[in-house]
Structures are given as structure tokens and as C-alpha cells.
Image (spheres, rainbow, N blue to C red):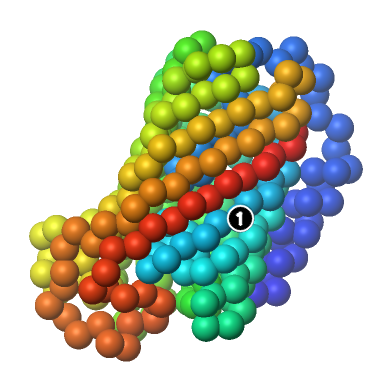
Amino acid sequence: MKNIFLAALLCTGVTAFSQQPNVINSVKTLSGVQQPFLFSVSTLTEPGWNINYSGSYGKNTTNPFGFNGVDQQFAVSGYLGSRFTLYAKAGIGFNESGGIRSLQQVEVIRDLIGGGGKAQGFRFGTGLGVRREWTNENVVFSRLTAALGNKLWNLAGNLLIEKAFDKDRDEVDLITAVGFHHKLGKQFFAGFEAAGEDLEGFWDKDEAEGGAKLFIGPSVNMTTKDSHFLFSLSGGPIIYATSSTRNIDSAPRDLNLSNNGYTVRFRVGFK
């Protein structure tokens, strides 16, 4: 499966370079910025392809908040037709014990409401994806996306329903994310991002992966005048909000459930 992920990512990258994107007049609105958030994904609002490089450092963290150590990721995204958005990424991580891990993910999201090149207003979409995680487990997931924006601000959120093919993981994982940005200058935006993982831990005391985990932190975003480059930064604490009664000594994730954690992530994008 690892080879399939890498092949898909390579093919997508070749397509991104070989196709000439439509020429558009870039509008300096927050809702026109391609993927301003680091923890919340939504469908694209402009034609063309985007290439991203990102890195993070995390302590006592798990996916989707980041990597428990230092990681680097490369990603491509773009429109397939008028309403489909393709995301593909691959990453390499270096944990504190000296080990090296890898990550691959591919997903397609379709706009059901809005989208289709419209940067402002309400957008709602749904998609499917597959991922090979840092700890070598294979995961399939479905994503619901929603975004609302205008010339001054943007609000976006996600709901992920994941199924991991590992006996020590939950039957189903629920992951949410939300982000808000407000325009503070011609190319500068700021706000916050928040995310929650294993939220079933709030009502299921036997949750397999240690209980619910929450993240919240500030988020900033800046674009260049020609809108070709995008710079994003976000980070904050990870709070282990509940604890599970299940014995998680053999859990596949690298974390210490007795302590909270934190994560910091940046991204440089090119369109």
C-alpha cells in the first residue's frame, strides 16, 4: 500500500507541473486564499495547482495534531473538473528516540453546495481518503467540510470519520477541526484554530486510545502581493481532556497519556 500512495502522489505532482492553470485575476480577500488553515481542510476556491511544504515539532502529540518529534511534509492540491478537489501528501518524521517514520495520504473532496470557483459565501463538501500513518497503520476516512467567508473573514470546519485497520484502535474515530481568520492588512490574516480527536472518549469510558484530546492555538497567514506564495503558522497546547479505563499499554501511538502536549506547525505554499 505504501507504494500505491507514493505512486499516486508522484502522478499528481507530474500533473500539477504539466498542466497550465487558468489565468485569473487574484482578489485580495481572505476567502480567496488557498487553504489558510493548517488543521482544517476545505475545498479549493480557484483553479490551478498548489504545492506546499510544511514542518512541525510536537511533544506528546498524535495525528492529526502533528508528529511526536520533528516532521517535514510535501503536498499538492488542485481541482479535478469544476467541483472536485484532490489532496495528496507525503511526509517523513524523526522522533526523539532517533527513529524515522513516514506518512502518505490521498483524498478527494466534492463541493455539494457553493464552490466551483466561488471564493465567497457558504461552501459544503464531502470526500473520501486513505492514509498510511506514522505508525504504519492503514486508515480510510470520510470528511465533511464547511466554510463561510467574505472579504474580511473566513470560518472553516471539518468532521472526519476514520476507520483504522488495527486491533488496538477504535472501531471508529471522530476528529473535528475549526479555524477562523480575520483580515488585518492587505496580505495578513490572523485568528485561531482548534481541533479534537477521539471525541467519543467524552461518552465512552472504554475508548481504545486513551480518551479525548483537544488542541487550540493562534493562527496567522500571509500572502505575497501576487498571491503566488502563502505562509502559515499555528501552534498551541494539546489537552488530554478525558482518560480511558482500557489498558492502552500496547496502543500503537507514541504518546504519554499522563501528560498534556503541544505542537507547532508552519507551511509555505506556492500556486
* Residue assigned mark 1: 55
The percent position of residue 165, horizontal first and vertical second, equals 41, 76
* Residue 27 visible in rendering: yes
Figure disc tally: 1
205 to the left or right of 265: left
Nearest the eye: 85 or 98: 98
Residue 120 versus residue 217 in the image, above or below: above
* Residue 106 visible in rendering: no
Nearest the eye: 191 or 125: 191
The percent position of residue 54, horizontal first and vertical second, equals 63, 51
Residue 205 versus residue 224 in the image, above or below: below
Q: Residue at x 49, y 22 (%)?
A: 114
User: Which quarter of the rendering shows the N terminus?
Assistant: bottom right
Residue 24 versus residue 110 in the image, above or below: above
Q: Residue 32 sits in which quadrant?
A: top right
265 to the left or right of 153: right
